Amino acid sequence: MGTIFSSNKKSRITEQDKAVLALKKQRDQLKQYQKRINNNLEKDKELAKKLLKEGKKDRAKLLLRKKKYQEGLLDQADKQLDQLERLTQDLEFAQIEKQVIDGLKLGNDALQRANSIFSVEEIEDLLAETSEAVEKQKEIDQLLSGQLTEADEEEVLKELDALILEDPAALPDVPLAEPSEAITDQLPDVPSHQPKATKTKEKVAVAAS
């Protein structure tokens, strides 16, 4: 397990990573070198003052020459340090650009695969079918929401009453939509002829007795 993980970890380090690490190492070494020279310059300056006080002018002059030479080395180190800094930044930015380009490639590949799933015609057909389904659903919603004319409502109620009258046992819990109208339909028709007079007279005679 450990070997596998370590090998995977090493494989992630690219040549550019190694170059950046090397440049940063050289940069740190130059900074340490500059620090050491600056310390020596201060020491040489103080020592030259001391030699002058002791009357050792030649040795003080030689020490100042050494100091001047070290200041030249320090200037060169500054220039090299600037070059290393710029090169390190360029490499790091190049890595970022590579990551961006790799990301764009992956995104482009994924987009092409997604676009290849459907053709333009299939998408147009799908949109058309979806639009038709939406319109049909709107019509159904309008019908179910009660947006009917009064004539349509009367036809629905009549059909409902007819179904209940055909088989009342099949729908025991469904009341008549208009009870008064249903009862009126069940009453016998009013006779259109006059009753016979003899029967009426007999009924009156019986009542009188």
Image (spheres, grey):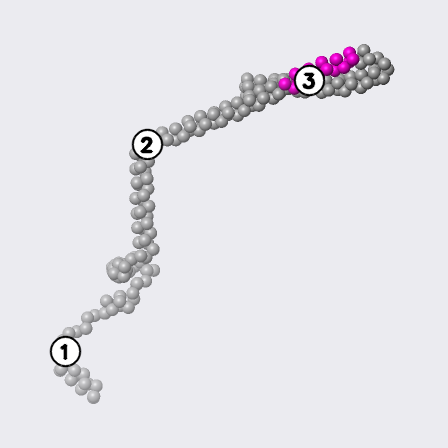
What residue is at 67 percent from the left and 18 percent from the top?
Answer: 75
Asked whether the beta carbons under mark 3 and mark 2 sit within 8 Å of each other, the answer is no
Point out the image quarter for the C terminus. Answer: bottom left
Q: Badge 1: few (under 14), some or many (20 or more) residues near its Cα, within 10 Å?
A: few
Q: Which mark is residue 70?
A: none
Asked whether the beta carbons under mark 1 and mark 3 sit within 8 Å of each other, the answer is no
Q: CA distance from mark 3 to mark 2?
A: 68 Å
Q: Residue furthest bottom?
A: 209
What residue is at 85 percent from the left and 17 percent from the top?
Answer: 53
What residue is shown with label 3? 74
What residue is at 32 percent from the left and 49 percent from the top?
Answer: 138
Q: CA distance from mark 2 to mark 1?
A: 84 Å
Q: Position of residue 61 (x, y in %)?
A: 78, 13
Q: Badge 2: few (under 14), some or many (20 or more) residues near its Cα, within 10 Å?
A: few
Inspect the magenta stretch and tell me whether residue 68 lies in it. Answer: yes
Q: Position of residue 205 (x, y in %)?
A: 18, 86
Vertical relation: 61 (above or below) 132? above
User: Along the line of sight, which residue is nearer the eye, 115 or 186?
Assistant: 115
Marks 3 and 2, the one that precedes in the sequence = 3
Q: Is residue 138 left or right of residue 65?
A: left
What residue is shown with label 2? 119
Q: Is residue 81 left or right of residue 166?
A: right
Q: Is residue 81 left or right of residue 180?
A: right
Q: Position of residue 134 (x, y in %)?
A: 33, 46
User: Along the line of sight, which residue is nearer the eye, 130 or 31?
Assistant: 31
- Which secondary structure lies at badge 2? loop
What residue is shown with label 1? 194
